[in-house]
Image (cartoon, grey):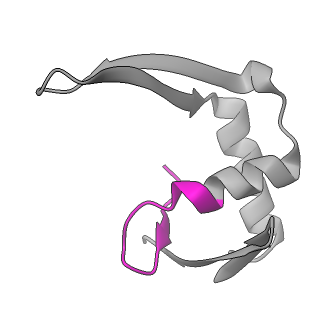
Amino acid sequence: MLGVLSTSGRPHYMAVSAVISILNIDNSHRVLVPFQTGTGYAGISVQYDDYTAREVKRWFDEHGWPLEIACGGRVFKLRYAN
């Protein structure tokens, strides 16, 4: 949704999750969505509401869309989709 990618070009959910943890967004903004694959595997996906997306985008805007994010002893290297 925000175009935050790993250096290999895949969506970087771990970096976005790190920003969400930095922002300390309340769990009430989490949405648990059941899913099932074509092979029969079923599970629950954690998604976030529009409020969370706006707050994460605001964080990226305020931090100049960095190429690295350090959080929890890890460094996430980023690039962005146009």
**Residue visible at 78% across and 25% down in the picture:** 27
| Residue 13 point in image, percent of width and height | 53, 54
2 left or right, relative to 24: left
Find out whether residue 69 is within the magenta segment: no
Q: Which quadrant: the C terminus?
A: bottom left
**Residue visible at 66% across and 51% down in the picture:** 17
Q: Is residue 54 above or below residue 50?
A: below
Which of the pair 13/82 is nearer the observer? 13
The answer to which image quadrant residue 49 occupies is top right
Q: Is residue 42 above or below residue 66?
A: above
Q: Is residue 41 above or below residue 12?
A: above
**Residue visible at 64% across and 83% down in the picture:** 67
Whether residue 65 can be seen here: yes
| Residue 52 point in image, percent of width and height | 71, 37
Which of the pair 25/75 is nearer the observer? 75
- The number of discs equals 0
Q: Main secondary structure of the magenta part?
A: loop
The answer to which image quadrant residue 30 occupies is top right
| Residue 22 point in image, percent of width and height | 85, 54
| Residue 76 point in image, percent of width and height | 63, 75
Whether residue 57 can be seen here: no
Find out whether residue 6 is within the magenta segment: yes
2 left or right, relative to 50: left
| Magenta span of residues | 1-15
**Residue visible at 79% across and 72% down in the picture:** 73
